[in-house]
Image (cartoon, grey):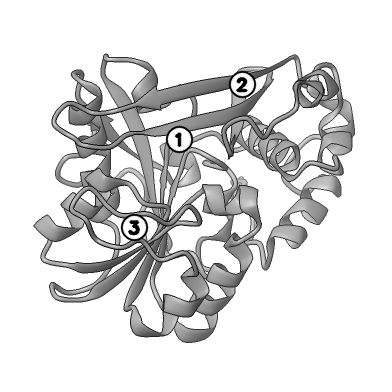
Amino acid sequence: MNTAVTTAPAAATSYDDLVTRVLRGEFGPDPRTRRIAVAFSTRQAVRHEGRSGGYRNEVLSLRLAAAVGSCAVEPGALPDAAIEDCVGADVAGLLEHELRPVRVAALDAYLMHVLPHTPANGARPWSLPAGSSLRKSRARARAVAGLPDVAPGARVLVVGVVNSLLEALRERGLAYVPCDLKGGTTEWGEPVRTDALAELERCDAVLASGMTLGNGTFEPLREHALRHGTPLVMFAQTGSAVLPRFLGSGVSAVCAEPYPFFWLDGGTGTVHRYRASDRPASDTEPGAAR
């Protein structure tokens, strides 16, 4: 008797390639037949205990059946009409919406629906403890900081500054170059660069936020990593189901964090780690949920 063998979809060669393949139905049901039931935004301001500075987040999220796809936006930049546009709309139409965050959130919702974060799809769960926002932030940072395949002393370009992540990189003995479009300084007074592409040549690896999908800077980072063999690790609330589709095509690892995010709840949580070079997802590793 023949046994059917299923294989994961081939890695996308670009963001546009991924969208084209989704529209062709290569990943699952025709996105023209799938409609968004709920659209909402989440706004947050935070200053962790013991930290001198804080930050704000705003995220657009779209619900497709049991799946939620998300894309971060600059606080205050998302018009209310965008949420109205999404409710009841089919995914295919939203993939062509004029606003990039809507397009990214719709793609994320669809891929979360057809390829959820499960071991069968290559994800390895990593448990986050209950506790304060800072405790959970540090736990997530350790999950991310452990993914770059580099030796102590290597220099990591961090695109999208998260102070807990910089702290975790130092604990691994790694140097870093913090970069964020907003500029400014880190918690420790280090200058934050604003041009990530200008820093690539002097760095041994890249850690980049999924927000690069929403602001259009992901593709140049992916293309550089693919050309030069530079490890590119994505930490993703934005596009957590999108970025694993680029594993082996410039992206070497992903720490995916779907909605609800760690900062929304004090209870336990889970992020999902992917590696391009992973063994079968049934394998476990220290610190992973069992």
The answer to whether one can see residue 235 in this image is yes
Mark 2 neighbour class, 10 Å CA radius: few under 14, some 14 to 19, many 20 or more: some
Q: Residue at x 48, y 64 (%)?
A: 251
| Image spot of residue 259 (x, y percent) | 49, 25
| Residue named by callout 3 | 279
Residue 140, picture quadrant = top left
Residue under label 2: 41
Q: Nearer the viewer, residue 208 or 65?
A: 208
Residue 112 percent location from the top left of the image: 60, 34
Circle 1 is placed at which residue position?
118
- Counting from the top left corner in percent of width and height, residue 76 is at 62, 30
| Quadrant in which residue 141 is drawn | top left
Q: In the image, what residue occupies the spot 47% across and 64% down?
A: 194
Where the C terminus falls, by quadrant? top left
Please tell me whether residue 218 is drawn above or below residue 164 in the rendered image.
below
The quadrant of the picture occupied by the N terminus is: top right
> Quick check: marks 3 and 1 in contact, CB under 8 Å?
no
Foreground mark, 2 or 1, reads 2
The amino acid type found where label 1 is placed reads: Thr
